Structure formats: C-alpha cells, structure tokens
Image: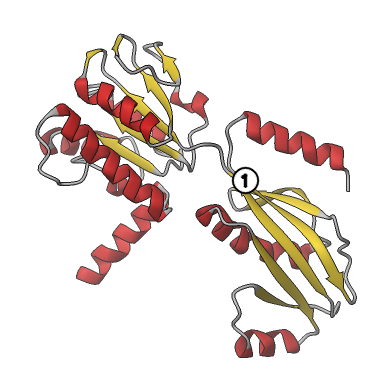
Amino acid sequence: METIGYAEEMHRLISQNMTFVTATVVKTDGSSLAKPGFKVIVQNGEIIYGTLGGACPDSVILDAAEQVLSTGIPRTIRIHLEESGKGLEAIISRKLPDEIYVETFCGGTIDVFLEAYRPRDRLIIIGQGGKDDIEDSLAGLGKLCDFQVTVIDHAPSLTEQPDTLITDLDFNLGDLNISRGDYVVILTKGDRDIPALRSLADSGASYIGLMASRKRASRDFDELRKAGVDENFLAAVHTPIGLDIGAISPPEIAVSIMAEIIKIRRNGASVVQHAGKMSEKRAKSI
C-alpha cells in the first residue's frame, strides 16, 4: 500500500480540521488477502482511503470505527473470516465486543488497530456585534475548558481574546468545515438567527444552541420549516439555551450554556444523534 498517499490524505484531513479514524492491520492468521500494514481511513461512515484486504473486512470495520470516534479510545478488533455457515453460528454463540465474524471462504483472522484523530474541540460563538457580556464570558469559559474558541462577530467588544476572531459580517459558516467536535452558540438575537441555523442544518455539529425567547425561536423554526430544513435538526437545537440552574446574570447564563455543552461533550452525541434520541423519547411517551 502506498504510504505516501496515506500520509498525504491524513495531512489533508488534519489541515481541514476534520475528524477521522485510521484502521491498520497488525496481525493476520490463516488465509486472507490482508497483510500487516494494510491501512484504511474512515470518515463520515465511509472508507475514503485504502483497504484491509477486500470487501469482507472493509465492510465490517465501519461500526467499530464509529464507536472509536465517539469514545476517542483506541481499540483492537479481531475479524474472523469464517466459512459459509460457521460465521452465523459464531455470531450467535460468541458475543465478545472485539470479535467480529464474517461469512466468507477465506477462513483466516485479521487483527485491526483503530485510532481516532480528532482536533481539539471547538467552541464557535456567533455574536450580534457590540458589547455582549454573555459572549465575552463564554469566550473565557471556553478557553478555560480547553476549547479552541472561534468568535464570529462583525463588531466585537471582548476582554477575552478568542483563538480565532472573524469580523466579516457576511462570513460563510461553511468555510469552517463544522462537524463533530464543534459546539456552536448563536447569540445573534434577531434576523441573523435564521441564516445561521440554515447554514448549520447539515453541519453535523455536536451542539447548536440558540439564544432566543420561546416566541422568537418558534417563529424562526416556522421560517426554517418553510425553507425545507429537516425537523430532526430543529428538534435538536438547544433553545432555550443552557441548563436550568436558575442563572440570572450574564456570567451565570454563560456558565449554564457551558454546562450544557460539557454535558453533550461528555455524552458523545452529535446533533443528528441527539435528534434521534429525542424522537425515540417522544415516541415512547405517546
């Protein structure tokens, strides 16, 4: 396998602040096309580079890669390439989490090491311009909690400098490659809410929070529905924003928002996954 191409692909993903999983064959036994050192890169549930030795091992690595990406914990799995008939029997009789059985005629085993690559979690704050004590407090709390803090605000008034400050009024959020590991707080408090939410609808961010009254959030969501934004996405937007801790002052409100973000961060669910859980919860309550 071409190690130069592998390194180039990893460099491309890292430079674009993307999350991905690498899977490397570390040991083989018996009959298999795989060889130690074979590698794949998995991103967004797909193999975007390499092979583990054919369609059989490649197809079963995706679920394990997703679990590694969610937890951030490296893992070694053993893929059993069982003869037809034996694979199903093995699946039923053995339920070890790191053992995967595939029906094929190879008959060998492949040990694969999986490791997640995730950039430092990013807190993205979208401001309205001018002095905003919640925005300022959030920027400081984000850095304190080891987030890479990005503030998008055309007229910022900050005492705590973020890692990245974007002052373009018409900045395209798509240029940030927002995905899992990104936590977005919308403090636009007006007509810019809707463009921001529309830009984030397909982003895969782990958290999106909107500072808005229930009335304004309802109005915003009605407009987004008319524009064809998916209902699952709207169900996952956190509004009213922050955990209910009785916060009153701007710093307290910022703490409640950060507490909600930390809760989602440690739970490991993306916006889409959270929406699915919300839908399941509603279905059970009916």
Chosen colour scheme: secondary structure
Q: Nearer the viewer, residue 37 or 237?
A: 37
Q: Position of residue 135 (x, y in %)?
A: 26, 23
- Per the image, label 1 sits on a secondary structure element best described as strand
Left or right side of 152 for 53: right
Q: Toward which corner of the image does residue 30 lie, by quadrant? A: bottom right
Residue at 48 percent across and 27 percent down: it is 174
Is residue 32 shown left or right of residue 61? Answer: right
On screen, residue 49 versus residue 253, left or right, reads right
- Residue 273 lies, with reference to residue 63, above or below; the image says above
Seen from the viewer's position, the closer of residues 238 and 134 is: 134
Vertical placement of residue 283 versus 84, above or below:
above
Quarter location, residue 224: top left
Query: Which quarter of the rendering shows the C terminus?
Result: bottom left
Say which residue label 1 marks.
Answer: 20
- Rendered position, 274 above or below 64: above
Instruction: Please state the horizontal and vertical placement of residue 66, each as a whole percent of the image.
Output: 57, 57
Q: Nearer the viewer, residue 272 or 147?
A: 147
